[in-house]
Every structure is written in structure tokens, then in C-alpha cells.
């Protein structure tokens, strides 16, 4: 019996976001390719697991986030996937160039496009409306 590539891709992406919500950064990284390409919303590309780990450490210090209403889709080949979700978070530490953090809560629709290679996530490109987030934390 042959494995369904679409189902396999959806499963790896779901496992990645479940690990995110569990705060299990090691489990997240175990699902990523060593040469991961990570495209940050309105930012540059970070390449490799070391860069991803550094990014997550920075994010974990400044934000407390949980992803809700996660929907995952993949193409028939299992090499491309997308996820749509709502980020429910708190802004904990002021980031350079952004409003001052005071523990503000926010809810932000977001999405990601992912490439899957050899059963691991090889690219994550995340999008959300930064102006909406700024409006929420500035209110």
C-alpha cells in the first residue's frame, strides 16, 4: 500500500503547529530540514536550524502565542502545504521599532506557506497584517 503524500504533508504540518502550541521547540525543530528557509513576515529570509532557533528564542522572550482555528491544506504531491490560523497572543517585551509592550493581548489572522522535502518542512513563509497587530497593541 502506498502512502498518501498529501496526507503525509498535512500530518507533518499539523505536528509542527501542535508542537508550537505545546511550547516544544525541540519537537518543532525535529520536523524541519537542516537547511530550512524561514521567511518572516515583512522581514528577510533566515536559513538553517540555528537561525530558526535564534528567531524562536527572540519570539518566546517577547510574545506568548497560541495558534487557534488551524486549517492545513497540501497539494497532491505532498511537496507544498498551506496553513491558516488565528494567533492569540500577548506582547511581553518591547521589540525594536514597535510599540511599547505592556502585556497587551491580540488576535491576529495569519497564514503560512510551506515546502515539504523528505518528510520535513524545508520552507516556512508566514504572513499576517502587521498594521492590524500594531493597531491592536497600541489601543
Image: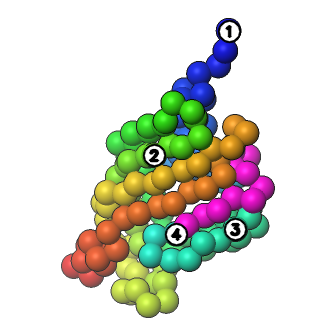
Between marks 1 and 4, how big is the CA–CA gap? 38 Å
Between marks 3 and 1, how big is the CA–CA gap? 36 Å
Query: Residue sitting at 78 percent across and 56 percent down?
Result: 34
Image side of residue 115 versus residue 67, left or right: right
Earlier-in-chain disc, 2 versus 3: 3
Q: Is residue 37 magenta?
A: yes
The image position of residue 50, as x and y in percent, is: 76, 67
Between marks 2 and 3, how big is the CA–CA gap? 20 Å
Q: Which residue is mark 2?
A: 82
Secondary structure of residue under mark 4: loop
The image position of residue 93, as x and y in percent, is: 49, 79
Secondary structure of residue under mark 2: strand
Please, is residue 44 above or below residue 24 in the view? below
Secondary structure of residue under mark 1: loop
Q: Which residue is mark 3?
A: 47
Could you say which disc has been placed on residue 1 in the image?
Answer: 1
Q: For the magenta stretch, what is the residue range?
A: 30-39
Between marks 2 and 1, how big is the CA–CA gap? 26 Å
Tally of marks = 4
Query: Residue sitting at 46 percent across and 70 percent down?
Result: 41
Image side of residue 35 versus residue 43, left or right: right
- Crowding near the residue tagged with mark 4, few <14, some 14–19, many ≥20 C-alpha atoms within 10 Å: some
The residue closer to the viewer here, 1 or 48, is 1
Q: Which quarter of the figure has residue 58?
A: bottom right
Q: Which residue is mark 4?
A: 40
User: Residue extending furthest front?
Assistant: 77
Please, is residue 78 above or below residue 136 in the view? above
Image coloring type: rainbow
Earlier-in-chain disc, 2 versus 1: 1
Q: Point out the image quarter for the N terminus.
A: top right
Amino acid at each position: 500500500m502506498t502512502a498518501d503524500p498529501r496526507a503525509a504533508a498535512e500530518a507533518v504540518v499539523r505536528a509542527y503547529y501542535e508542537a508550537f502550541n505545546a511550547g516544544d521547540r525541540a519537537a518543532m525543530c525535529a520536523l524541519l530540514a537542516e537547511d530550512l528557509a524561514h521567511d518572516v513576515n515583512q522581514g528577510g529570509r533566515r536559513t538553517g536550524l540555528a537561525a530558526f532557533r535564534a528567531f524562536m528564542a527572540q519570539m518566546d522572550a517577547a510574545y506568548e502565542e497560541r495558534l487557534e482555528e488551524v486549517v492545513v491544506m497540501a497539494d497532491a504531491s505532498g511537496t507544498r502545504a498551506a496553513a491558516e490560523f488565528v494567533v492569540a497572543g500577548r506582547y511581553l517585551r518591547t521589540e525594536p521599532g514597535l510599540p511599547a509592550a505592556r502585556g497587551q493581548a491580540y488576535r491576529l489572522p495569519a497564514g503560512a506557506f510551506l515546502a515539504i522535502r523528505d518528510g520535513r518542512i524545508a520552507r516556512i513563509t508566514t504572513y499576517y497584517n502587521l498594521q492590524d497587530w500594531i493597531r491592536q497593541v497600541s489601543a
